[in-house]
Image (cartoon, rainbow, N blue to C red):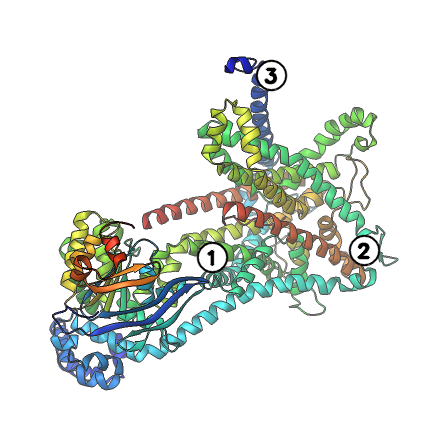
């Protein structure tokens, strides 16, 4: 399965025989999947297929749901994500996340980006200022907000807010960034900017994106995984998936026969 | 065809009359519901206005029977002391418990705690009086043996406030959007950091509303004071022991209205007006706060 | 970089190095930072790797981000990584501590409930064990002979509660219909708010109002009228027309309960789907037919819930009743009779009773009966309304 790449593929997150449950409902069935370092991996599939559950499992954001549990193995750099000795807080520091709807804090633009650093104990104003600037630049937002860093984050447009959330995630320097339909609430221009941004970021970060927009998956990702009813149907090179899928269900989905 | 089956088109006069009558009935009921409530405020004003003046709220009662001269300064000071004591107990405990219910909401223990907290909301005030008496006031058996005192009464009122503050704190925290909390968690914040830095600040108006709601609920409480404090015509010098009783507006009204003295009844109605105005102003403040926090919540999306 | 920063990373070898460099190059702050950052990054791999197996695992691939020197924020990243390694155990423990600490808050509530129930049961025990179940239905209450029975007070309590609800429920329901369907729109918000606010007036004020206004009104007009009309046929309406008694207490408690029942009923009326209303109109209903035959039946569960809550509020009411009921231990046979309720008896006599253990225990057992009824009734009302409205219900406190 892991063919077709030009760079050497280095596994970042490896998931083996992974199942997830909400109470008695099984949301994921025995998923085997590898996310490679510094690649963009897209997850597509119809609503309720488990792609978001899978994504949120990777940084233990599902821990807060009642009765959520997992079986099987998921490792980050070989370290078991769900090991009882692992502190989920540290996992989330290494695996950042950007959500479907922009969710800035009720703070200034500056404090939004600085939040993750402050909670980790960085107090120096100059260090913070430096990182905030770099993060905002990396999220292609700096030029738009540099004159009003102390203004409320809610004064920004939806697309700007989402880039602010990306900057906020970048500021804590995660190794992996999970994007959960980051553009679904945005207009096409903002979406295009987010997609550009992902291309810029991929040199430095491992990115996993859930999207229900197949064009988006095709445009931005190196590898694409297709989920259906809680199972991973197929994962492969994006070009391969979209031109010559191995599974007929994948073909049905991308040609618009269902979903 | 329809004409053949239905005897007449349009409304029968019976239906017309019934329509008008039932409609008027609701209007009459509405007037019956609102009038007594307004009458209470008006009568308190009308029957008490003879005693109303600035000195009424700044002087202590005097004369014989006591209260026939002077004002209600003892009651106002005492009520403030009681509310302060009640808040000192209930605000930290209530917020603490509210945080617990919010943070660990799905655990069985939290469910039991929430149920019992809600049950405490329904405990009649006279029962609180009995409980306060045995926990704080009585001089025999277990308990603090503080006698009839401000501290005993204040903490008993604090007991009454705890479930209110708990419930409203939990609700205010629940109203903080989940995405907001998740945003912080995804940055690797610990739950302590999320609570201290984001959840509490975002819920602070709601929590403040809850505290004021609790104060509002204990402000006019009289029954618990009969069991734990009774009354003081002066400014207390101590909050425990035999000299520890404090004055209280509600108790003052109770004692004055119980006396067969028209002059004291006037004082009672004036005091009732003062208490009513304080309660209504506080209520208005709460509504403004709640309105403000809704606006705030809307801005946060 | 400031002191805290140093403090946080001091334990690390790299950090010591950083500190030394910083000490030398402190003068122009920004330059020092940059230098420090660069130095740190260039030297990061080795010293950090000894301190951190996690970073090693990626670095061993020879693909360390830091060594490429294009990291997003060179110095900041190192700061964070250092903090992460040294703080792993600490975060863990503090998280656990945090949860445990919160649990203590919940424990306070449990303890408070246990205190309320425990005090009531323990202090009532002498009476419970001496009189058993017969306490509930015997009506002798004689401290001198040490014989106590609750019946008189239970009956008195239900009389007052019954009169209050009979008076309040029709008015409350009809006025909530007025507000939901008949009143001009501009009136609704203001009046509803006003009603809710007036419901917050302390019960002692209601009681004082009762003495000043309601008692003379009943004594001089209502009760003589009742005696001369209905009273001629039924003794139930006849009496001494004193003004004080179960009627005065019941009516004033009724006035107090109206806003609660009206508010909760209105909340459920609002939730009747628009489609239901439109369907009724589309079939040719008059407005009253829609309101009374379609809307009202649709909210019966909500009304039951509101009545249960009103019952819970009325039954525990103390001060207004204490001032108005006449406080005489007799079972009322007429609506003009005086009586006694559980709560008014306790408020009136508990401080005398307390010197006599069995007397006190009997009063507390009465209180326990009231407590149990209140808890059951409030739970029922809440559960019912919660199911109907999906959760949110403002706290209402029983009595005053």
Tags 3 and 1 in contact by the CB under 8 Å rule? no
Q: Residue at x 36, y 79 (%)?
A: C89
Residue farthest right in this picture: C145
Residue B187, horizontal then vertical, whole percent: 29, 65
Q: Of residues C382 and C29, which is closer to you in this image?
A: C382
Disc 2: CA contacts within 10 A as few (<14), some (14-19) or many (>=20):
many
Q: Of residues C84 and C8, which is closer to you in this image?
A: C84
Element under disc 2: helix
Mark number, residue A26: none
Q: Of residues C48 and A52, which is closer to you in this image?
A: A52
Quarter of the image holding residue A97? bottom left
Q: Relative to C103, is A253 above or below? A: above
Tags 3 and 2 in contact by the CB under 8 Å rule? no
Q: Which is in the foreground here, disc 3 or disc 1?
A: 3
Q: Of residues A76 and C98, which is closer to you in this image?
A: A76
Looking at the rendered structure, whether the residues under marks 1 and 2 are on a common chain is answered as: no
Residue C134, horizontal then vertical, whole percent: 83, 56
Disc 3: CA contacts within 10 A as few (<14), some (14-19) or many (>=20):
few
Whole-angstrom CA distance, mark 1 to mark 2, is: 41 Å
Q: Relative to A213, is B196 above or below? A: below
Q: Chain of mark 3?
A: B
Residue C28, horizontal then vertical, whole percent: 11, 73
Element under disc 3: helix
Mark number, residue C135: 2
Report which residue position mark 1 lands on.
Answer: B170
Report which residue position mark 3 lands on.
Answer: B14
Q: Report whether B7 appears left or right of C281.
A: right
Q: Quadrant of the N terminus of chain A?
A: bottom left
Looking at the rendered structure, whether the residues under marks 3 and 1 are on a common chain is answered as: yes
Res A136 visible: no
Q: Report whether C29 appears left or right of C340.
A: left
């Amino acid at each position: 399965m892991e063919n077709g790449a030009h760079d050497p593929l280095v596994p970042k997150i490896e998931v083996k025989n992974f199942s997830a449950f909400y109470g008695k409902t099984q949301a994921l069935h025995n998923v085997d999947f590898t996310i490679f370092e510094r690649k963009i991996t897209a997850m597509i599939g119809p609503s309720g297929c488990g792609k978001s559950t899978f994504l949120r499992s990777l940084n233990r954001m599902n821990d807060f749901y009642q009765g959520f549990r997992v079986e099987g193995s998921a490792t980050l750099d070989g370290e078991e994500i769900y090991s009882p000795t692992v502190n989920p807080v540290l996992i989330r520091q290494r695996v950042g996340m950007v959500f479907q709807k922009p969710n800035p804090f009720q703070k200034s633009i500056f404090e939004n980006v600085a939040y993750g650093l402050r909670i980790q104990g960085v107090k120096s104003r100059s260090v913070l200022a430096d990182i905030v600037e770099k993060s905002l630049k990396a999220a292609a937002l700096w030029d738009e907000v540099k004159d009003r860093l102390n203004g409320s984050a809610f004064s920004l447009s939806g697309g700007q807010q989402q880039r602010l959330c990306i900057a906020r995630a970048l500021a804590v320097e995660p190794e992996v960034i999970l994007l959960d339909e980051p553009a679904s609430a945005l207009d096409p221009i903002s979406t295009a900017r987010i997609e550009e941004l992902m291309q810029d970021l991929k040199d430095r970060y491992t990115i996993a994106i859930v999207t229900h927009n197949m064009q988006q998956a095709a445009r931005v990702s190196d590898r694409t995984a297709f989920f259906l009813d809680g199972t991973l149907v197929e994962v492969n090179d994006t070009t391969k998936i979209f031109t010559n899928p191995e599974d007929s269900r994948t073909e049905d989905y991308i040609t618009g026969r269902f979903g | 065809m329809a004409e053949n089956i239905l005897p007449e088109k349009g409304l029968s006069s019976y239906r017309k009359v019934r329509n008008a009558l039932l409609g008027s009935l609701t209007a009459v009921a509405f007037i019956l519901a609102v009038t007594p409530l307004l009458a209470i405020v008006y009568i308190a004003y009308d029957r008490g206005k003879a005693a109303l003046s600035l000195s009424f709220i700044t002087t202590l009662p005097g004369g014989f029977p006591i209260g026939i001269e002077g004002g209600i300064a003892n009651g106002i000071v005492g009520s403030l002391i009681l509310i302060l004591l009640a808040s000192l107990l209930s605000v930290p405990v209530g917020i603490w418990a509210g945080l617990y219910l919010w943070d660990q909401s799905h655990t069985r223990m939290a469910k039991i705690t929430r149920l019992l907290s809600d049950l405490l909301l329904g405990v009649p005030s006279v029962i609180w009086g009995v409980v306060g008496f045995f926990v704080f006031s009585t001089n025999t058996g277990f308990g603090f043996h503080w006698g009839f005192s401000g501290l005993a009464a204040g903490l008993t009122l604090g007991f009454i406030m705890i479930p209110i503050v708990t419930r409203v704190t939990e609700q205010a925290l629940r109203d903080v959007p989940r995405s907001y909390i998740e945003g912080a968690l995804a940055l690797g914040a610990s739950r302590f950091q999320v609570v201290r830095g984001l959840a509490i600040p975002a819920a602070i108006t709601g929590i403040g509303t809850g505290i004021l709601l609790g104060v509002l609920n204990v402000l006019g409480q009289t029954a618990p004071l009969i069991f734990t404090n009774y009354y003081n015509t002066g400014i207390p010098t101590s909050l425990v022991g035999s000299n520890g009783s404090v004055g209280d507006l509600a108790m003052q009204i109770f004692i004055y209205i119980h006396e067969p003295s028209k002059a004291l009844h006037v004082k009672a109605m004036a005091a009732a007006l003062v208490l009513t105005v304080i309660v209504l102003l506080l209520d208005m403040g709460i509504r403004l706060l709640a309105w403000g926090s809704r606006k705030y919540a809307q801005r946060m999306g | 970089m400031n002191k805290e920063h140093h403090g946080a990373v001091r334990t690390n070898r790299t950090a010591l190095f950083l500190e030394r460099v910083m000490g030398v190059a402190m003068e122009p702050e920004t330059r020092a930072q940059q230098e420090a950052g660069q130095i740190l990054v260039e030297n990061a791999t080795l010293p950090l790797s000894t301190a951190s197996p996690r970073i090693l695992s990626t670095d061993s691939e020879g693909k360390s981000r830091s060594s490429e020197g294009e990291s997003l924020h060179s110095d900041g990243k190192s700061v964070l990584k250092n903090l992460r390694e040294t703080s792993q155990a600490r975060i863990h423990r503090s998280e656990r501590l945090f949860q445990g600490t919160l649990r203590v808050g919940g424990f306070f509530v449990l303890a408070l409930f246990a205190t309320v129930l425990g005090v009531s049961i323990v202090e009532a025990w002498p009476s419970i064990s001496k009189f058993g179940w017969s306490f509930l239905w015997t009506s002798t209450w004689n401290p001198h002979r040490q014989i106590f029975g609750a019946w008189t007070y239970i009956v008195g309590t239900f009389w007052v509660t019954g009169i209050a609800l009979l008076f309040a429920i029709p008015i409350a329901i009809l006025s909530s219909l007025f507000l939901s369907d008949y009143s001009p729109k501009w009136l609704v918000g203001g009046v509803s708010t006003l009603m809710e606010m007036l419901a917050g007036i302390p019960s002692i004020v209601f009681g004082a109002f009762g003495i000043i206004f309601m008692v003379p009104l009943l004594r001089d007009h209502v009760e003589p009228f009742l005696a001369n009309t209905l009273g001629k046929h039924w003794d139930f309406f006849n009496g001494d027309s004193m003004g004080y008694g179960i009627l005065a207490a019941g009516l004033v408690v009724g006035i107090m309960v109206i806003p609660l029942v009206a508010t909760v009923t209105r909340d459920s009326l609002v939730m009747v789907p628009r489609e239901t209303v439109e369907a009724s109109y589309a079939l040719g209903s008059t407005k009253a037919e829609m309101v009374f035959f379609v809307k009202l039946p649709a909210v019966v569960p909500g009304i039951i819930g509101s009545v249960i809550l009103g019952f819970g509020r009325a039954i525990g009411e103390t001060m207004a009743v204490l001032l108005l009921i006449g406080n005489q231990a007799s079972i009322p046979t007429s609506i003009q009779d005086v009586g006694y309720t559980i709560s008014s008896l306790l408020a009136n006599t508990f401080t005398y009773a307390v010197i006599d253990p069995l007397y006190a225990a009997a009063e507390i057992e009465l209180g326990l009966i009231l407590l149990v009824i209140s808890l059951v009734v409030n739970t029922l009302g809440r559960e019912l309304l919660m199911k109907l409205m999906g959760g949110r219900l403002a706290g209402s406190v029983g009595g005053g």
